[in-house]
Amino acid sequence: MRDFVESLEGEHRLALAFGCYACGIILAAHDPSTLQIWLVAVAVAATIALTRRSDVRPVRTLSRLAPIAFSFGLAFGASAISRSEHPAFAALDGHHVVLEGVALERPKQADGLSMRVRVVHVRAPAAAAAASLAGQTALVTFPSAPHLPSFTGTRVLLRARLFVPGGARNEGEPSERDSLGEQGVAFLLSAHRSRDVSVLGPARGWDAWWSSARQALADRLEAQLPPLEATVLEGILWGDRGNLPASLRQEFSDTGTVHVLTTAGLHLGIMAGFLTALLMLTPLRRPLRAVVVLIFAWAYAALAGMHLPTVRAAGMLTAGTIAVEAGRTRTPSAVLAVAACAVALPHPLAVLSPSFSMSFACVAGIALLNPMLTKLGLRDDCGLPPLLAEVLRTSLSVQIALWPLQALYFYALTPYAVLANAVVVPLVGLIMAVGALLCVASVALPPLALPLGNIAWWGLAFLIGAVERFGQLPYAHMDVPPPSHAFLVLYWTGLIAAARWVHVHCASRPPRVTEMPRIAAYAAAAGVFLAFVYAAPAIRNAFDRNLYVHAIDVGQADCILLRAPGGHAMLIDGGGRLERTAAGSVIAAPIGDRIATRVVVPFLLRHWVLKLDAVVLTHPHGDHAGGLPVILEHERVGVLYDSGQPYGGPAYRRTLHVLEARAVPWSQAVRGVRGELGPAHFEFLAPERPFITGSPSDVNNNSAVVRVTYGQVAMLFTGDAQAEAEARMLSHGGTDLRADILKVGHHGSAYSSTPEFLAAVHPKIAIISCGLHNVFGHPSTRTLTALRGEGSQIYRTDLDGGVSIITDGASLQTRAMHEKLSGS
């Protein structure tokens, strides 16, 4: 034990210190209570006191180093979180501003156009909070229009509405603030008209120069290559994949190779490797070569737009290089710790980002597992070509290290990632070299641009073809629930233990054949134990006797998940958006697909909902049906209930198409239809034949209305039913309308929730699903007043985020993502 402590103190002291620092940041991010902070302080003081008189010097050193690093992490993390959640410009949220800025990139197509702009001057308002906008980077969205000017590198005038990114909207979901922060974006600007974004002239400054240079190189590449290949090459060289087709982007994701289109550690490592190899041919001394490599690394980061992952990678490379050249590191863990400190000391919240975790897991996996695989027989002389053996070792090491994090952050398992990366990553290195030469030749030596363009095209065509082939294999992408943090700790503990065992027992030879059964038995036992830990949430759900109602925050749309005892589940609507613009044209790219992919399907997986007993489509409008095509493709569904109204909207047509392709049973939801959800029961109260006609919105008024009962608790979900539908249900006496929980009709609009209907329901809890800053003014003041008159406790997804209600059939417990901001 003493030898272990001395080894830890001597060889891994920096890694231990950084680990404690990171743990402090993680604790701060989980909003610790005062009691928890006091308990940590007492534990730190007790540790120092108990080890102060130890006769083992490493014990004394570590006992002081670890608590100090942890305390710094807790303090730095809390301070950074406070600054992030309460920016100086928070008072401008929802207000109109007039700004001047530098356009950092060309607009990308996504529900209109969007681009990043660095603010240089604030024209209006004159409030003190507005001064803090200068120097910040905003993501500007504005409508598309013909004949737009070239924005990149220009000074632009913006008239827009400012929005401050908020926290997570649903339980376990990444926050918009953190997601945009990864792009260096501090706030959002929404311009109502395309002419509200205008060019004032050329901009000055280093970021304008680099943006213009990047655009000029992109124009030259696009002149030499077909559009698809040019887009992929731009993604590989500087991370611009804005015009990549959605299908190919998905195939990169499904094969675990999407990282090659994001400029980060891989790209900087390849660049540094090529440059170092070239400099080795010169008479430059090693320290000077290191300086040249670092200069080029930061220039490359600037060309890529100085996104945070790129800056972190450049910072890690710089810190690691300086540490090695200064002779201050003796082990890989020390180099890794120095690089991590270079990133996390100035930006503590970087520790919480997926890119940080995956970057360091990748490097740690190579350092830990590559030697282990070598000793297990995957050597350079194993019968394979040495280069292929090295590629396979590295690819295996990376994927073994990364797959739990891929499941944690992206809810995906990519079985072919090892083979796909073994093919793609070496090819990316060659394409980067040829692409860089093509950029230089297109500027300085135009005659060489054509042959280099042909070589680049061959390489890109092969890469795209390989990704498409791997992506089309069966089970190329598997949706999986995210692992718990306990699983991650145990998984990495197991990897470290396995690497240590191999280092001790296989130092001079691979395992003998007679030893393989024992090794296989140990591996199988560890695998079974890890599988049990991984599936623990599903086991807990199977024995849980509570029913859960989740109002998922999907913006100005509806999506309700019911989880009943025994693992039964029902989804009511799938989120989405209304499908027509103000001009009446149909939106080509369904927003509902993105909402389902980014919000609804991950929410289902986080709660281990792998099968839906039933899906209820209350009515076919896009803000209810928009996400269903993707949900039906990803989930096993027992039956879909639909009111059966004739409707030609694209989301509804796609839903019916997927329904047929997946052979999901269809049932018409009309009054009197009943069903069971485990021990819970449900019954449809509307619509009924003949359908309501001649009302202001017949589609809304013929919404499927379903009442669910569990024990003594009743729940009523009304879709977008309006006053006419409510009156029709009341005509049956209204006794079957009583409910403890009411999903308020039509997003709380003034066209629903009549006093007579609310009196019949008399809900204890009312949930209104509507979007923050929605243009419809939902919910209506009249509806809120009527609900308060019934004594209902009101929850709104625009203010409260996702809402969850737990019932055992007798009592109700409610929790919301955000503290209530209104008096409801």
Image (spheres, grey):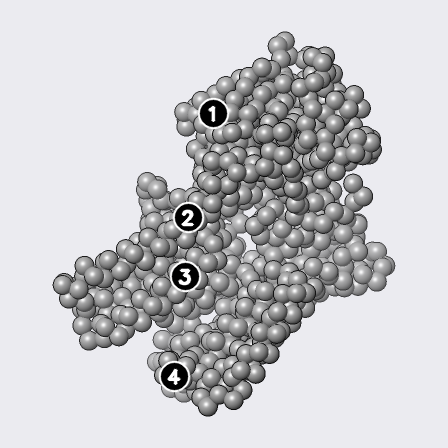
| Circle 3/circle 1 CB separation < 8 Å | no
SS class, disc 1: loop
What residue sits 63% from the left and 9% below the top? 690
SS class, disc 2: loop
Front: mark 1 or 2: 2
Q: Earlier in the sequence, mark 3 or mark 1?
A: 3
Kindly identify the amino acid type of the residue bearing the numbered disc 1. Val
Q: Earlier in the sequence, mark 1 or mark 2?
A: 2
Q: Is residue 663 visible?
A: yes
Crowding at dot 4, Cα within 10 Å, few <14 / some 14-19 / many 20+, comes out as few
Kindly identify the amino acid type of the residue bearing the numbered disc 2. Ala
SS class, disc 3: helix
SS class, disc 4: helix
Q: Which residue is mark 2?
A: 535
Question: Looking at this view, is 209 or 37 the one in front?
Answer: 37
Placement of 612 over or under 278, stated as above or below: above
CA–CA distance in space, label 2 to label 3: 14 Å
| Circle 1/circle 2 CB separation < 8 Å | no
Q: Which residue is mark 3?
A: 490
Kindly identify the amino acid type of the residue bearing the numbered disc 4. Arg
Q: Which residue is mark 4?
A: 2
| Circle 2/circle 3 CB separation < 8 Å | no
Q: Which residue is mark 1?
A: 639
Quadrant where the C terminus sits is: top right
Front: mark 3 or 4: 4
Residue 350 in which image quadrant: bottom right
